Structures are given as C-alpha cells and as structure tokens.
Image (spheres, rainbow, N blue to C red):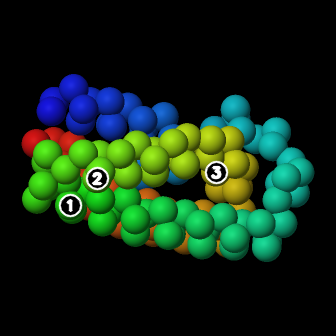
Amino acid sequence: MSNQNSTRRGFFQKLGLTVGAAALIETEALADINLNRFSSEEDRKSFLLTYETWVNDYIEVVEKEKLLKSDISNKHRIMELSDQASGWQEQIKEYLQHDDFKNKYISLSKKFAESITPELEA
C-alpha cells in the first residue's frame, strides 16, 4: 500500500494539486504566459465546474477506499479519475494567472488535499 500511496502522491504533485503549487505561479518561469492565449472567462468557469465534479468524485472514491481496500472496481475508478486529470497541468498553470480562477481553484484544491492527505500519510 505504501507504494500505491507514493505513486498517488507523485501523481498529484505532478498535477500541481497541492496548495504549495499555487506559489509557483508567481515565478518568472510562468511570467511570459499570454493570459488570454488559450482561455476565456467561460473556459475557466467550465474547467472549474469540471474540476469541482472531479474533486467530489475523487473524494468519494478515496473515502470508499478507506472502508473497502479490496474493492477492485473502486481501484479502477481511482485510475479512471487519475487518467482524466492527467492532461490538465498546462491548462491549470495558464488559468491560475487569472484571479477569477485562482481563488476557486485553490479552495477546491484545499478541499481535495484535506480529504486525501491522511490517506497518503497512512
């Protein structure tokens, strides 16, 4: 189980869902991003709705995993959700340049982190 937790932790760190990742947005490495290159306010709102649904779904499967560690279908669902989020990193980096997105994203990410952190440290 420790290896699974390590893999899961690595995935989420790579995805940038930890609250600490928000601090990286202020670095010079991202300063040259054109704020409107790939996004509009509607795009960001749509993504946040998708992300909020994803966070709630993931919390649900993590809670189920805590109770039923041998549930194979739940493990498959965790993998499906991880796959769904695997391509979001660049999009999130760009969207975080916008305050309308950043505040809601950080709030959702905190909710997410609070639900999975005890599982990762176990």
Q: Within 10 Å of the Cα at label 2, are there few (<14), some (14-19), or many (20+) other Cα atoms?
A: some
Which amino acid lies under the numbered mark 1 shown in the image of this protein? Lys
Where is residue 81? Give x, y as percent. Answer: 45, 51
- Which of label 2 and label 1 is nearer to you? 2
Residue at 16% from the left image edge and 30% from the top image edge: 2
Q: How far apart are marks 2 and 1 (CA)?
A: 7 Å
Secondary structure beneath dot 2 equals helix
Which one is earlier in the sequence, the residue at label 2 or at label 3?
Answer: 2
Which one is earlier in the sequence, the residue at label 3 or at label 1?
Answer: 1
- From the viewer's perspective, tell me whether residue 99 is left or right of residue 72: right
Which amino acid lies under the numbered mark 2 shown in the image of this protein? Asn
User: Is the N terminus in the top left, top right, bottom left or bottom right quadrant?
Assistant: top left
Q: Residue 49 carries which label?
A: none
Q: Vertically, is 31 above or below 81?
A: above
Asked whether the residues under the numbered discs 2 and 3 touch, taking CB atoms below 8 Å apart as contact, a structural biologist would say no
Q: Name the residue under label 3.
A: 92
Res 118 visible: no
Which amino acid lies under the numbered mark 3 shown in the image of this protein? Ile
Secondary structure beneath dot 3 equals helix
Q: Mark 2 points at which residue?
A: 74
Q: Distance between the residues labelled 2 and 3?
A: 26 Å
Q: Mark 1 points at which residue?
A: 64
Asked whether the residues under the numbered discs 2 and 1 touch, taking CB atoms below 8 Å apart as contact, a structural biologist would say yes
Residue at 42% from the left image edge and 35% from the top image edge: 11
Q: Within 10 Å of the Cα at label 3, are there few (<14), some (14-19), or many (20+) other Cα atoms?
A: many
